[in-house]
Image (cartoon, helix red, strand yellow):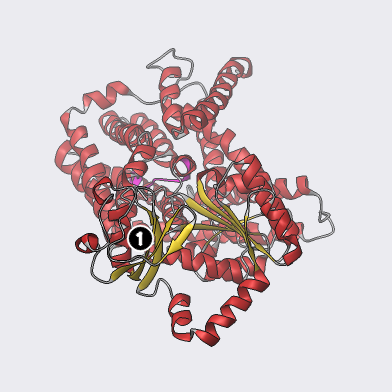
Amino acid sequence: MSASLLPVIAAVLVSGLAIQLLAHRLKIPSVVFYLLVGVALGPEGIGLITLETFGSGLETIVGLSVAIIVFEGAFALRIERIRGASTVSFRLVTISAAVMFLGTTAAVRLFEGADWEVALLIGALLVATGPTVITPILEVVRVRDHVATALETEGIVNDVTAAIVAVVIFETLLLDDLGVPTTVLSFLRRLGVGVAAGVLATVVIYYLLNSDLVPQRDVQASQFLVLAAAVGAFAAAEVVAAEAGIAAAATSGIALGNLDLDNREEIEQFTQNTTLIVLSFVFISLAALIDIEAIVGLGAGVVAIVLAVMLVFRPLGAVIATVGVERFTWPERLFIAGVGPRGIIPASVATLFAIELELAGNIEAGQLLVGTVFAVIFATVAIEAGLARQIGDFLGVSPMRTIIIGGGRVGRTLAKRLENRGEYVVVVENDDVQIERARTEGLTVYEGNGGDTETLRRAGIEDAKWFVAATRDDDINLLACQLANTTFDIGPVYSRVNEPDNIEAFESIGVTAVDSPTATAAALDDEIERPALAHWMNELGDGHDVQETGVTAEHLVGRSIRELNEDIPDGAIVAVIGRNGETRVPDADDVLEYGDRVTFIGDSTAVGRAVERFHPHE
């Protein structure tokens, strides 16, 4: 058996590595390729992987793999991030999950004529999205932090609840018909066991990490101990109650992820790399078990179910989750509605249940279960995950970033002013106190050293249109600016300069330097001589704004300011015009030329509309 498994495992792992490279190059979520390669390796393809390949060990392999994947996703979910999308996240895992559960159940009953027990089982399984499909999408489509957090939280929590609900329905309703009260109690017991096991594992691992057994700088020991929390919590919970292990892994991940751990960055990198290997192995292996014949045999009914899940229940749940939450724009709401592929949990649990049903003689129910679940997985992964980047680009949910190095008072103030104008700002900071303050103020923060190339890359500098160094240390600012200019070729680059004598060093590498003492003196002068204007400028974004744009609209070139009054919305005026390096207040008879820099001042809405009219692609 071990000799026959060797080529299978090697083929899956090598395929997974190749898929990662291909997905990164093509900017397509890796799960799409996992699905295709899995089918090619399975009975529908060359037959390398079959249901008998892993024998009775399939359940254990899948369970441990899912535990590691869920743990890694949960470990990255910091409480500060969840707060930014708390309302939407809560609705996604409660009301929206209920909509998907009940809606899918009704669709399966209506379109396939299934028994209520089987329909409820399928409905429960198809609630789960999960980090197995969401994480690869978010690596390709960079969205604002609150959108990513909402999707990640939904995936992790719904993976847990869907797995437990499905097992409870299977055991108490489908097999034994014990009734609803028993079903509810069984669900609560499994969830309680999982949470308790997760908390216990967290306490033990945290104690070991802070004991004399693990030196502070022993990175490898820290990495393996944290991974042991995932495996240990899962195993302990599974011994007590089936499928409670997923809840245990998620609980320990969230708990450990929000504790103060040494070597956190190295631990996160290790868990991410481990998850990549495990994810490729288990997704390809399960995809190989897709029964195309069973799906086709369901006929038009399964097509109707797929369409209902993708076009009715998911969008309805997304609208319910985001309604009234102003931070989520309509494009972001539509993105959540359009991207909700199903992942490992439905595939693995459905496969195991189908085997049990067929052994019990209920072959028809097993085929309906597997066929429907895999049809939805196949369709949602191929369409929603496969086209995720195109959907994001079409909706405009991947805005170009402004990277600010330093989350101190200057960095946070600048970030809030830019966000008030609709910019997407990412603050890079490595001080825990400043990180907490920035996240409390609703800012997106990436933890790390702003002078490190890999940190900047992970923060999204390659998608940035502006780069600002705003720390108190000129050496750090200069290093960060050099990396932005030379390594990433980002422009324009700005920097706070704390010592006036250092300005020349910044300007010599093409950085626009702002002398902090001079800027402070100018601000004090404005307060003394122009207090009303100073206060107005300090409150930009609070109903009023000042914006500068280039004139690129051809129909405006050659027309005077007087003639353009009808194109300038009420509530906004042209304050100054810049041309050939000179700036002046325009006369009514001044004629615009292509490329002129026009500064508008006035109400925020009116200024925004004016900028769009003068430079439609700004």
Q: Is residue 61 magenta?
A: no
Q: Is residue 126 magenta?
A: yes
Q: Position of residue 125 (x, y in %)?
A: 35, 44
Would you identify the image quadrant in which residue 185 lies?
A: bottom left
Number of marks in picture: 1
Which residue is the site of mark 1? 328
Give the structural element (helix, strand or loop) at label 1: loop
Residue at the image position 45 percent from the left and 22 percent from the top: 37
Q: Nearer the viewer, residue 542 or 235?
A: 542
**Residue 442 appears in the picture as rendered:** no
User: Is residue 529 depicted above or below 253 in this figure?
Assistant: below
Q: Position of residue 497 (x, y in %)?
A: 68, 63
Q: Position of residue 500 (x, y in %)?
A: 72, 66
Q: Position of residue 136 (x, y in %)?
A: 48, 39
Q: Is residue 119 left or right of residue 94?
A: left
Would you identify the image quadrant in which residue 589 lies?
A: bottom left
Residue at the image position 55 percent from the left and 38 percent from the top: 65
Q: Is residue 320 left or right of residue 439?
A: left
Magenta region: 124-132
Q: Nearer the viewer, residue 333 or 605?
A: 605
Q: Nearer the viewer, residue 2 or 102?
A: 102
Would you identify the image quadrant in which residue 333 lies?
A: bottom left
**Residue 184 appears in the picture as rendered:** yes
Instruction: Assess disc 1: are there few (<14), some (14-19) or many (≥20) residues with their C-alpha within 10 Å of its C-alpha.
Output: some
Q: Is residue 501 left or right of residue 581?
A: right
Residue at the image position 65 percent from the left and 72 percent from the top: 518
> The N terminus appears in which quarter of the rendering?
top right
Task: Give the amino acid type for the residue marked by disc 1 in the picture.
Answer: Phe
